[in-house]
Image: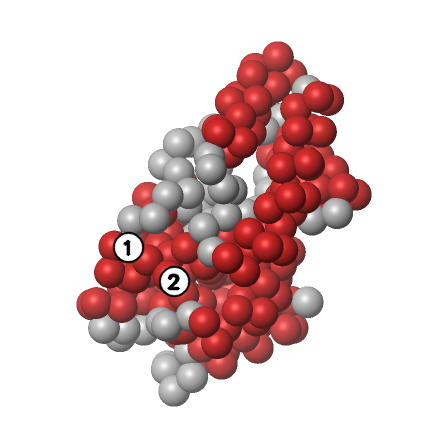
Amino acid sequence: MITELKHRWTQLCNNKDSQLTSQLWNEIETQYSEKSRHYHTLNHLHHMFQAYDEVEPLIHHKAAFQFAIWYHDIIYKASKNNNEEQSARVAVDRLQKLSLENSQIELIKTLIISTKKHSILADKHISDNAYLLDIDLSILGSHWDSYQRYCSNIRKEYKIYPTFMYNKGRKQVLKHFLDRNSLYFTEYFKGKFETQARKNIKRELELL
């Protein structure tokens, strides 16, 4: 998996400074491999890129979209509420070094921040933003066994909080998703995951 991810990164940075490309990869691998992480890991990136491959022809700004995947959780601390903003700042700094165009960097920044509340912020790029958010939440529509592993790993990331506090916060998040007309924005992911995702969330709520 790591070899595949590194290849993806190298391909995305094609014709860029090879030494810088390698340095940025090492940072990505290190950040997503932090001991405090159990769900927001390289496995999460791998899962997102697998979903990306399914809809790749439908993505308009493919390079920006992929960079947004790479950097959307580069900073992740369960005790902080500004991870997305911090991740966006890191992305801007690193991608400027790769000499990406400012308009491209701005789109990537917006896409990353949109994952904070899972709401579309890129008004001029609604379709790409919708697909990114749906890919990020595709785990919700997985089979129950996979969903349970996801729940367990999220709990481990929030282990600093006692059960009563965690359960209260988790219920709020899950109920927020259920209250939406649809968990997913795109027809593709609605059709593939919506029904199962709602079943999984309701089942988790019963267990909390």
| Contact (Cβ within 8 Å) of mark 2 with mark 1 | yes
Q: Amino acid at mark 1?
A: Ala
Residue located farthest toward the top when viewing the structure as drawn: 164
Residue located farthest toward the left when viewing the structure as drawn: 102
Q: Residue 45 has which mark?
A: none
Residue sitting at 49 percent across and 67 percent down? 25
* Residue 119 appears left or right of 208: left
The residue at which mark 2 appears reads as: 128
Vertical relation: 205 (above or below) 164: below
Q: Amino acid at mark 2?
A: Asp
The residue at which mark 1 appears reads as: 122
| Image quadrant occupied by the C terminus | top right
Please provide percent x and percent y for residue 123.
25, 55
The quarter holding residue 203 reads: top right
Residue located farthest toward the bottom when viewing the structure as drawn: 15
* Residue 157 appears left or right of 134: right
Residue sitting at 37 percent across and 81 percent down? 17
Seen from the viewer's position, the closer of residues 82 and 147 is: 147
Vertical relation: 51 (above or below) 154: below
Disc 2 secondary structure class: helix
Residue 38 visible somewhere in the drawing: no
Please provide percent x and percent y for residue 29.
55, 60
Vertical relation: 196 (above or below) 111: above
Vertical relation: 123 (above or below) 60: above
Seen from the viewer's position, the closer of residues 139 and 164 is: 139
Residue 126 visible somewhere in the drawing: yes
| Image quadrant occupied by the N terminus | bottom right
* Residue 191 appears left or right of 127: right
Residue sitting at 68 percent across and 36 percent down? 199
